[in-house]
């Protein structure tokens, strides 16, 4: 095992923290009234500040709907000051619950109702007791780097003892070793959504090791034995050989005599997405680039219906001082090798030997005194805690449900719109956030659905600033007043009218403005929450409940809608305003980096990007335009499409328009085309000015056009008279040298071809429909 230590140039603060804001992270809080949470050990080990978290957060989402996961992390990602991984996961289960007490669930069945803590619903629980007991009794992985933390002695030998948690402190039924390390080597109930990392070349490793796709092994011991031995000196081996050799103590009713090295199947879901994280900076719990929140857009799986789930975000940071990944190799199992004392830093720093290095303070220990100037008589003390050089933070949501779509929404695209934040001014809520709609700006296509839903608490600190009844969270949605001065739209191709205007503090008059085509009844419900509340004092929504749900609503009129919350939009100190831009074309914003990925566009086109095609994260935007919509745009620009004689697909527009790939690498675009028997089909690319059209070298087969591209542009398939083939091929050869490819589809006219496209996209690589 090799450990590399570099001069410690950066020093870590005690709290580096990660907070989940949508869905609301609990940070171990449960509907409590204080600014500080009552019990930091209630459910999990966050290592976060006591003031973080939200009291309440349970919502439901439709399967296949789109949910923006938003968080803040304090110590930067995608920044050279720290290695960083963000791991997003979820778990579900009938017994998963928030509980009704802030007391930690006991570690002793005698303290639970019916001697069964798993079913004692007073206590919040994510992982269950059996899982915890297995962790508590299982030998820890002795190949892990432990620095100078004390992990000796018989009571520090199991998976609850780690470098970050040497004393084995318990938080809920979380397993500390699993908590600190990812991917974990034993089975866990956690399913992976995404891994966002500084080093995307690790992605193939994460994706293949994820329990989503890979079975895990553990030493299986009958439950009765584990319960009977919970407080004895019994230990469960962590490898096959020792497991099979283990003779079980006699326990009534158990026939097994030895441990069984058992395979626990993979979760059987697609590998998680994996890409570079977006940039965030040190010492700031805030937005990322461009002022946008740190986000992952999760498309909740389609075939998924669960009543009780929790979302988990993990934030793993380590300094550049050591090669963390080489230190977690379980094959380095000889105990002791991973102790700090064994690490010889002398070579690294050009010192004679280990003793000489130690004399100068170049040792991996707490607060070393380094003698930087060899002949000077002073040393400088470094603020190092070896439990924290390489550290994991975490937050978890309150429970949520995923429900089946009603029959009439089977194929609908559903966007969740929620409210984040809690009552108070920016200082009082920190490290939580003030109220905001999530997503603050939603771009959607006409015909898709929005699902307004939010929740809050009645027990925020009573002196926190806010309108209405002290301590309470309430929100509503009303259209803002119309604009009274002209304004350029600033957004290319933003169609339709503007409803409501930026920055207005008064609501609009519903008689002369539409809001998302909603009927008057819905508008009233959104304003005074009356589909959930019968009468009462609602001028500041005080008598309404904390939870609100309008249900999914279809939006058909294009335009940009500006809305606000009347109660919380106290201009002097707070704003709660949101925006929905309803477009006449479908749009997907997807981030793809070194690891590549497959993107399906409305099931009508697919882009497959192999690993190592992009050098870094690219924010792609993919739009699909109907031909009539595109023709209108082209005419507006005074252009025309002067190639081919008819359409064989819709228009696909991929942004940015520049070359995206490294060197001469390409990615593959597939789009659905309709090919009349008597005609050829040619695929053309143009820029956003529609000035010139270039014929691409595309393979047209079985209703699919497949071609290679290097960047964005506008793509369309055109029918051509047979004679055009020769000319087309020549142009195509020239065009091949040029850039990209665009895809198109005419799935509506040919819906049966849709399956073949989807099949094609699947074959092309991981189906990352989640990304769209
Ligand atoms: C954090 O990074 C270290 C390497 O520095 C790795 O060993 C560990 O598994 C990671 N943990 C998580 C939760 O990502
Ligand atoms: C506005 O919020 C700040 C904290 O950001 C607080 O100090 C100030 O008192 C608030 N203003 C009013 C009028 O309450
Ligand atoms: C707006 O909020 C501040 C506290 O943040 C409060 O002092 C003020 O009274 C509020 N304004 C109104 C009109 O309620
Ligand atoms: C998530 O979607 C929003 C628009 O809906 C987009 O602006 C943002 O870039 C997306 N985030 C990522 C990480 O792709």
Image (cartoon, helix red, strand yellow):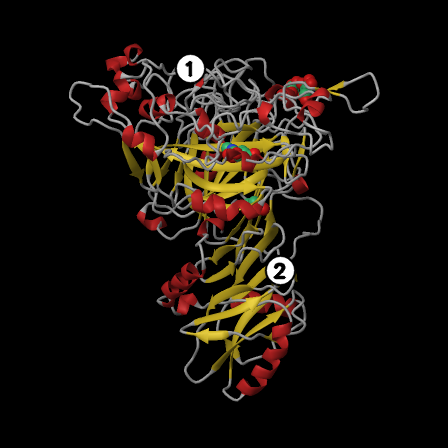
Answer with the quarter of the image where residue 308 lies.
top left
- Residue displayed at 72% across by 32% down: 349
Which image quarter has ligand 2?
top right
Q: Is residue 419 visible?
A: no
Closer-to-camera residue (503/5): 5
Between 269 and 408, the residue placed more toward the observer is 269
The image position of residue 399, as x and y in percent, is: 40, 29
Q: Which residue is mark 2?
A: 661
* Within-10-Å neighbours for mark 1: few <14, some 14–19, many 20+: few
Q: Residues within 10 Å of mark 2 (few under 14, many from 20)?
A: many
Question: What residue sits 47% from the left and 29% below the top?
Answer: 334
Q: Where in the figure is residue 714, as x and y percent of width and height?
A: 59, 66
Q: Quadrant of the N terminus?
A: top right
Which residue is most to the front? 352
Drawn side of residue 662 relative to residue 61, left or right: right
Q: Nearer the viewer, residue 623 or 528?
A: 623
Q: Nearer the viewer, residue 125 or 153?
A: 153
Instruction: Identify the residue at the far right of this view.
Output: 376
Callout 1 secondary element: helix
Question: Residue drawn 30% across and 21% down?
Answer: 118
Reading the image, the residue beneath label 1 is 155
Of marks 2 and 1, which one's residue comes earlier in the chain?
1
Across and down, in percent, residue 278 comes to 61, 42
Answer above or below: position of 153 versus 290.
Answer: above
* Residue 581 picture location, percent across and down: 57, 48
Q: How many marks?
A: 2
């Amino acid at each position: 095992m090799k450990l590399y230590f570099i001069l410690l140039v950066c020093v870590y603060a005690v709290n580096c923290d990660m907070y989940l804001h949508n869905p609301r992270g609990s940070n171990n809080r449960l509907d409590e009234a204080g600014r500080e949470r009552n019990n930091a050990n209630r459910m999990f080990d966050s290592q976060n500040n006591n003031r973080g978290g939200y009291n309440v957060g349970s919502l439901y989402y439709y399967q296949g709907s789109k949910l923006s996961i938003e968080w803040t992390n304090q110590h930067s990602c995608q920044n050279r000051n720290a290695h960083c991984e963000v791991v997003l996961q979820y778990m579900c289960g009938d017994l998963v619950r928030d509980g009704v007490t802030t007391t930690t669930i006991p570690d002793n069945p005698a303290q639970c109702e019916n001697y069964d803590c798993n079913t004692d619903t007073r206590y919040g629980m994510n992982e269950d007791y059996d899982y915890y007991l297995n962790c508590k009794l299982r030998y820890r992985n002795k190949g892990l780097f432990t620095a100078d933390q004390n992990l000796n002695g018989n009571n520090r030998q199991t998976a609850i003892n780690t470098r970050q948690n040497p004393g084995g402190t318990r938080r809920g039924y979380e397993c500390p070793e699993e908590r600190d390390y990812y991917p974990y080597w034993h089975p866990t109930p956690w399913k992976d959504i995404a891994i966002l990392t500084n080093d995307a070349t690790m992605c193939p490793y994460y994706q293949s090791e994820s329990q989503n796709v890979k079975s895990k092994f553990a030493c299986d011991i009958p439950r009765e034995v584990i319960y009977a031995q919970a407080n004895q000196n019994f230990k469960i081996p962590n490898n096959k050989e020792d497991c099979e050799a283990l003779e079980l103590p006699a326990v009534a009713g158990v026939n097994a005599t030895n441990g069984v090295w058992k395979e626990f199947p993979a979760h059987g879901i697609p590998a998680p997405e994996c890409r570079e994280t977006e940039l965030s900076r040190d010492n700031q719990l805030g937005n990322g680039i461009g002022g946008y929140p740190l986000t992952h857009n999760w498309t909740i799986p389609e075939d998924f219906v669960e009543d009780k789930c929790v979302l988990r975000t993990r934030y793993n940071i380590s300094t550049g001082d050591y090669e963390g990944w080489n230190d977690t190799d379980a094959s380095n199992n000889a105990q002791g090798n991973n102790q700090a004392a064994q690490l010889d830093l002398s070579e690294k720093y050009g010192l004679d030997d280990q003793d000489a290095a130690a004399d100068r303070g170049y040792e991996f220990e707490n607060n070393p005194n380094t003698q930087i100037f060899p002949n000077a008589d002073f040393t400088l003390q470094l603020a190092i805690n070896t439990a924290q050089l390489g550290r994991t933070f975490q937050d978890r949501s309150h429970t949520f449900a995923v429900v089946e779509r009603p029959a009439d929404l089977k194929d609908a695209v559903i966007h969740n719109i929620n409210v984040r934040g809690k009552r108070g001014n920016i200082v009082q809520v920190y490290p939580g956030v003030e109220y905001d709609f999530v997503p603050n700006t939603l771009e959607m296509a006409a015909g898709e659905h929005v699902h307004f839903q939010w929740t809050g608490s009645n027990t925020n600190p009573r002196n926190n600033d806010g309108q209405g009844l002290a301590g309470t969270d309430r929100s509503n949605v009303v259209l803002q007043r119309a604009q009274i001065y002209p304004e350029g739209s600033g957004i290319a191709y933003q169609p339709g009218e503007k409803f409501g205007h930026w920055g207005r503090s008064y609501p609009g008059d519903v008689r002369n403005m539409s809001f998302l085509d909603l009927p008057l009844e819905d508008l009233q419900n959104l304003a005074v929450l009356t589909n959930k509340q019968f009468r009462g004092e609602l001028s500041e929504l005080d008598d309404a409940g904390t939870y609100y749900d309008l249900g999914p609503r279809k939006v058909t009129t294009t335009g940009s809608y500006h809305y606000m919350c009347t109660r919380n939009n106290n201009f002097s100190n707070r704003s709660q305003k949101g925006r929905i831009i309803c477009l006449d074309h479908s749009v997907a914003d997807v981030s793809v980096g070194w690891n590549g990925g497959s993107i399906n566009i409305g099931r009508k086109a697919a882009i497959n990007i192999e690993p190592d095609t992009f050098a870094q994260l690219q924010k792609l935007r993919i739009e699909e335009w109907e031909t009539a919509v595109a023709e209108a745009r082209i005419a507006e620009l005074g252009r025309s499409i002067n190639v081919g004689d008819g359409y064989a697909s819709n228009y696909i527009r991929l942004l940015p328009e520049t070359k995206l790939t490294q060197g001469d690498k390409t990615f593959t675009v597939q789009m659905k085309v309709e090919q009349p028997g008597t005609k050829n089909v040619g695929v053309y690319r143009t820029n956003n000015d529609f000035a010139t059209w270039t014929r691409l070298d595309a393979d047209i087969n079985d209703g699919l056009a497949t071609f290679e591209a290097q960047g964005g542009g506008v793509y369309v398939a055109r029918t051509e008279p047979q004679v055009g083939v020769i000319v087309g091929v020549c142009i195509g050869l020239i065009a091949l040298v040029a850039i990209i490819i665009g895809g198109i589809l005419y799935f509506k006219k040919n819906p049966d071809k849709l399956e073949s496209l989807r099949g094609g996209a699947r074959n092309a690589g991981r189906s990352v429909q989640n990304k769209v």
